[in-house]
Amino acid sequence: MQKSFAMAALLAASCGAHAASDADLAAIRAQIDDMKKTYEQRIAALEQRLVQAESQASSQAKSEKSVPAPSPVENRQSVAPTNAFNPEVSLILQGQYRHAKNVPGRGITGFVPGGEGLNTRGFSVDETELVLAANIDPYWRGQVIVAMADGQANIEEAWFQSLAIGQGVGLKVGRYRSSIGYLNEQHPHMWDFADAPLMYQAMFGEGASYVQDGVQLKWLAPTSLFVELGSEIGRGANFPGTDHNNNGTGGGALYIHVGDDVGVSNSWRAGASWLKTRASERSSDFVEQLGGNVAQGVFNGDSSTWLADFVWKWAPNGNSAHQNFKFQSEYFVREEKGSLNATSVDSSYKTRQSGWYAQGVYQFTPQWRAGLRYEQLDSGTRDFGANAANLVVDSYRPKKASAMVDCSWSEFSRVRLQIAQDKSMFGITDNQLTLQYVMSLGAHGAHKF
Amino acid sequence: MKHFIFACFFGLTVGSAQADLKIFATVPEWGALAQEIGGGKVKVYTATNAFQDPHRIEAKPSLLAQARQANLVIAAGADLEIGWLPLVLRDSGNAAIQNGQPGYFQAANFVNRLELPATLDRANGDVHAAGNPHTHLDPRNVLKVGEALTARMAELDAPNAAAYQAGYQAFAGKWQTAMTRWQKDAAPLKGVPVLVHHASFVYLLNWLGMKEVGTLEPKPGIEPTSGHLTGLLARQPGAPAQMVLRAAYQQEGPSQWMAGKTGMPAILLPYTVGGTPEAKDLFGLFDDTLQRLLKGLR
Ligand SMILES: [Zn+2]
């Protein structure tokens, strides 16, 4: 613990530090600058002569009134013309030091886990993300994001989107992060905290995002109020659904986003979304009432998730470079209905669970930001029908409070210290400390609001 | 292809007849120029103001909503808007304003860009890979961009082509006169060495024959650090600067510190239209810029 604080202090100190300037280098630079200035002045003189010549020519043309002025030639000079057709490449390096309690199979009490559980402690490197993107032709643009970890490379996203349909219509086809909610579309390097809110882990498992293989169709209304309607259909293979090798679709979503500015300093976006998936043979662990042994339960049925999200951003005069504040909150309700087979007993299965988080992040200097997050889930009602007598039904309200400070040397490098009190598991109060880095190499990607 | 898809999803085509050319300008200077040329025939929406760092704009919902309806997007170009505009264009669902379409105009493509880097390495900071994009502070560039923009507006809105040509001719005439005046007034500024906060004034200094002897940012896009400022201060006796310049959107702290240590004046320049109360339009922008520079000389 003390060591990690020392490390944080070290990193923080270097964040405020500066590159030592070498006197020789400075002198050389000054010489080069001088040379450059001389050339620039010469070019300027030439330009001026050109402008004069042009204006004479155009006045001649005007007086003759015969030849239309030649339209100016567009000059799209770039530094590396041979590379111009290659995709934009960027790479995200992310890793952390984490101090937490050892809880094998870490989960959230009262919620069906969507993965093995995140119990990594000490030093670790997160998935390394490789992003490739380019316009395919005037009609389409493509992007792929590969997440690399030891011995594996996962296709996180691989899609193409329309550029030329017009009328506010956007089409995306392939594997994509669903546009439901606010955080769902954001990759971990864009998060304001070192981990995803409990709500996203409860909804979608470790990845904390719903990824769909399918088609997204959205429409932006021709109004000065931002109104975006979207629909998605696809394979629905990911938790809370399961993979079906069927004809037809396994899941779908609908969403609406609305947003605007308030004055010059504030802007906001609000959204509502609905996600429907189907699960067959979705197995998860339950606890037997007698003896307390772990029992495998298999769920078949439908899962519906409703989400509401809200983001408010403030920056003085809309200039977010120096100071800004961001408030963000989301709420979800999930209902699952179907059948459960556990301890060789078939029963009905009906649950209704919910949760929310709210967070605020304040950037008080160009380099430093600080943020607080509070979140709570409600295991809600879980009706296991005939299995109610066999299985333990946890009723619990998982809670977590987090605080973070981060420092960015530039737009491309960031280090973050986060402390959290995690009460997401019954009977365990886990005080966590995370020291995290996020580094972006390569192309300057544009970030969503 | 385009029509096929569209018909598939909606089975109808919506004819959009509009009286005005709807222009989405990313920065105030080019919005102001479009207004000069288009007059009453255009409706100009300016996405940012003079107090916002043009390198750090976010893809706000309001910008998407405006881009959706635009016939023409005027960008500064040279990657100035790389952090937000590509996203806004793609998510706008507006086919007319995509890169490569006539409805997408980049001002920097029509001027001779300065500071094209020989090598690209972020070790040099957030360098502008396509050259310095702050091209508008050389009034000769304003004319070049104006001419190209007029042609583009005429292409997109042929019925009003003559009006745009006339608008541009009237503007260019006044501009030429103003330029002669500015060049005469600015004569004392020639050769004056200055420090700048960010390389926002390269074209201005180049036009006026002034000398940039250093930037307060250690590298482009990196905020001034005390170490770097001290280094600049140490260089002052050898290569003295006479004033330190910053744009309206930049923090005053670093240039005030420099001014306090050296006694040179710290000068706020409007940088773009709206940056000072005097810089109401493009003429005001240059009038006020020169006045502030000349005042710094005294
Ligand atoms: Zn710049």
Image (cartoon, rainbow, N blue to C red):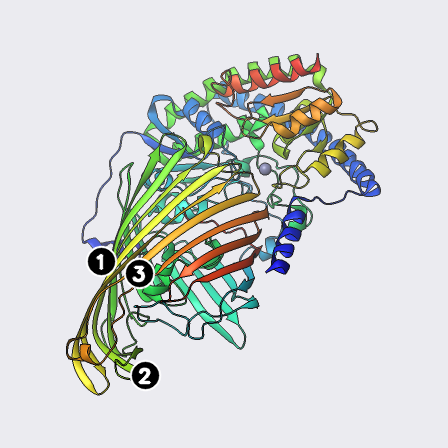
Going by the numbered disc 2, the residue's amino acid type is Asn
Which image quadrant for residue B88? Answer: top left
Kindly state the secondary structure of the residue where label 3 is placed.
loop
How far apart marks 1 and 2 lie (CA) works out to 55 Å
How far apart marks 3 and 1 lie (CA) works out to 48 Å
Residue B171 as seen in the image, left or right of residue A29: left
Which image quadrant for residue A311? Answer: top left
Residue B133 at what x, y percent from top left?
57, 37
User: Is A372 or B55 nearer to us in this picture?
Assistant: A372
Q: Which residue is mark 2?
A: A293
Task: Inspect this view and state whether residue A192 appears.
Answer: no
Which chain does the residue under circle 1 lie in? B
Task: Inspect this view and state whether residue A375 appears.
Answer: yes
Mark whose residue sits in front, 1 or 2: 2
Which dot marks residue A397? 3
Q: Residue at horizontal 80%, vertical 39%?
A: A26
Residue B83 at what x, y percent from top left?
49, 45
Residue A365 as seen in the image, left or right of residue B169: right
Q: Quadrant of ligand 1?
A: top right
Residue B46 at what x, y percent from top left?
41, 31
Residue B57 as seen in the image, left or right of residue A345: right
